[in-house]
Image (tube, grey):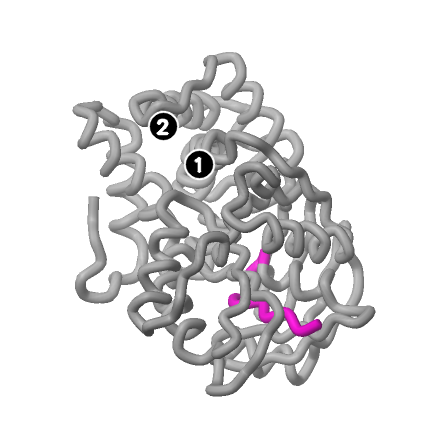
Amino acid sequence: MRVIVFGAGAVGGLVAAKLLGGDREVVVIARLDDVVVLRSRGLHVSGRTEGTFEPSSFDGLVMGMEADAVVLTVKSYDVYEAARQIGRFLPTHPPLLALQNGLGIEEQILDGLRAEGSPTPPGRVTPGISTVAVTRRAPGELFHAAEGEVILPSPSEAGSKASADRFEGLLTSGGFSVRRVGEFARERWRKVIVNAAINPVTADHDVLNGQLARDPWRGQAETLLHEAQAVAEAEGISFDDSEIEADLWRIVRATAANASSMLQDVRRNHRTEVEAITGEILRRGVTHGLELPASRRVYDRLKAREPAAPPGEQRS
């Protein structure tokens, strides 16, 4: 079985490492600097997973490349172009598992596939939610801080039960904890709300997740949490205050030693996923007439610090 992991960041690297073995061939699609390291030194993982792993790696798909499944782990801002590559170069049209942060990811994937004339049958894209805590310390070097889980739609909600079942089996065989849930849209919003509280504060102030339990960061995180919660409510997804606050502090405790993905990007002077998280919350809030001053402030601060976006990127 050949699995393509498209993206060699923290989550993608860990997925590639854990899926290697048995009858599985893993191919990583990554940027050239990552490919050079993976080919010369392999992928070193420490923490909850230990070892050096040697997946095949390329800096792009090529015509005629085949795969039985694709796990898409690129950053949210690279999803559309990655989907175009998949549509252009993978003639077998394999099922895709999308493990991005943020909202509107499946729509971007389908748009990218359609742009290349690639068919998009129901269930070709399976959405997933990862709560695995892993830090990319350098190209080819990861720290797996906490196990977490991967959440997939329940069989009754999955667009294609066969595809979702395939990814459940694949991830489970690699040692991931997998949970299938009904009301998947609610679970997606749950993660977006918690991400909107954790990621921007840690990135803006250069603190690890565990430090959010103390003021002044605690108050900032809770304010962002409730602004995102209000947008979810306006979109028809409700959470009790006690429920969503418990989720936030449970994740903070479980990932206390972890640097959020947004903080990792800021430290490397890379673009962040603030557009797909806080930016999307702001855009949806505007359509519902909501004032989100804390979200606006942190969004503007992080956008001002990151490298210039390519021409044409939408700003909130």
Left or right of 89 on screen, residue 214: right
Q: Is residue 8 visible?
A: no
Residue identifier under label 2: 228
Q: Quadrant of the N terminus?
A: bottom right
Which label number is shown at residue 31? none
- Looking at the rendered structure, the secondary structure element under dot 2 is helix
Residue 3 part of the magenta segment:
yes
Left or right of 274 on screen, residue 90: right
Residue 209, image quadrant: top right
Left or right of 137 on screen, residue 221: left
Count neighbours of disc 1 (C-alpha within 10 A) and say few if under 14, some if 14 to 19, many if 20 or more. Answer: many
Depth check, front residue: 209 or 235? 235
Position above or below: 307 against 161: below
Depth check, front residue: 294 or 74? 74
Residue 191 part of the magenta segment:
no
Residue at the right extreme, as displayed = 22
- Looking at the rendered structure, the secondary structure element under dot 1 is helix
Residue 76, image quadrant: bottom left
Position above or below: 97 against 61: above
Q: Residue at x 21, y 23 (%)?
A: 290
Residue identifier under label 1: 192
Left or right of 209 on screen, residue 293: left
> Residue 51, image x and y in percent?
79, 65
> Residue 215, image x and y in percent?
48, 22
- CB atoms of marks 1 and 2 within 8 Å: yes
Real-space Cα separation, disc 1 to disc 2, in angstroms: 8 Å
> Residue 5, image x and y in percent?
58, 67
- Point out the stretch of residues depicted in magenta: 1-11
Q: Residue at x 60, y 31 (%)?
A: 251
Q: Amino acid at mark 2?
A: Ala
